[in-house]
Image (cartoon, coloured by chain):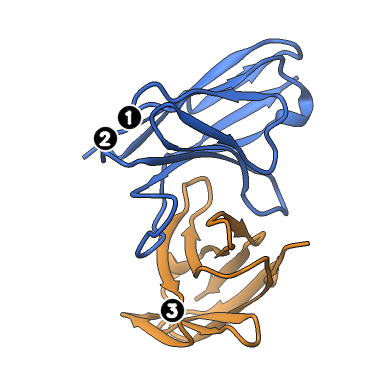
Chain colours: A orange, B blue
Amino acid sequence: GQNIDQPTEMTATEGAIVQINCTYQTSGFNGLFWYQQHAGEAPTFLSYNVLDGLEEKGRFSSFLSRSKGYSYLLLKELQMKDSASYLCAVMDSNYQLIWGAGTKLIIKP
Amino acid sequence: NAGVTQTPKFQVLKTGQSMTLQCAQDMNHEYMSWYRQDPGMGLRLIHYSVGAGITDQGEVPNGYNVSRSTTEDFPLRLLSAAPSQTSVYFCASSYSGQEINTGELFFGEGSRLTVL
């Protein structure tokens, strides 16, 4: 079966750095996505990786290793507004997105 | 731009009732989809469409119908509501279901449905 694993909850301090991991087992691979979802709101797109390596976008970076079935989202200089759930999703061979359950990130002052 | 618009935002139904969740997008996206989101679970695809007149089933289609008569609209119908359909429903669209460059899905604000 297809599976996306990510931690349920993480806590970090304002101004610090946090890394949210995602491991996956899917039927084929056509890209890995990270979305941010604030409580009670819709998910919004953060990043897309299809090749191995690091993609940097401001305070957020996303890394992919296809051979290991592994990705992480790195958030730097954490701000209170970064408190949200972070969703990892993989596009399989049928171009369908398989979603993880999300990681709830709590930022403390 | 309005983006993806979903209505209603909240709805309470009794078991056995039917209803339609509306979804409209003004971005000329070919691909539209419906997801449900339940606590502790990832988003699950209900139905999707790659263009007007074309629909297909996702992971959890039972109890739901869709149609796509225009590019803009993709309504989701609950035929006979059951408590198991209590969930948050999201409509999402993108430029294409295949060969998309970034994979960016644009989501509506969500519809919170409770079935008693």
Which label sits on residue B11? none
Of B42 and A93, nearer the camera is A93
Dot 2 amino acid type? Asp
Labels 1 and 3 positioned on one and the same chain: no
Residue A81 locus on image (x, y percent): 42, 65
Quarter of the picture containing the C terminus of chain B is: top right
Labels 2 and 1 positioned on one and the same chain: yes
Q: Quadrant of residue B80?
A: top right
Nearest to the eye among marks 1 and 3: give it: 1
Relative placement, left or right, of A20 versus B9 is right
Tag 1's secondary structure? loop
Dot 1 amino acid type? Glu
Q: Residue at x 53, y 72 (%)?
A: A107
Which label sits on residue B26? 2
Q: Between marks 2 and 1, how big is the CA–CA gap?
A: 6 Å
Residue B115 locus on image (x, y percent): 71, 22
Disc 1: which residue? B72
Tag 3's secondary structure? loop
Q: Between marks 3 and 2, how big is the CA–CA gap?
A: 34 Å
Of A51 and B90, nearer the camera is A51
Which label sits on residue A78? 3
Tag 2's secondary structure? loop
Of A83 and A94, nearer the camera is A94
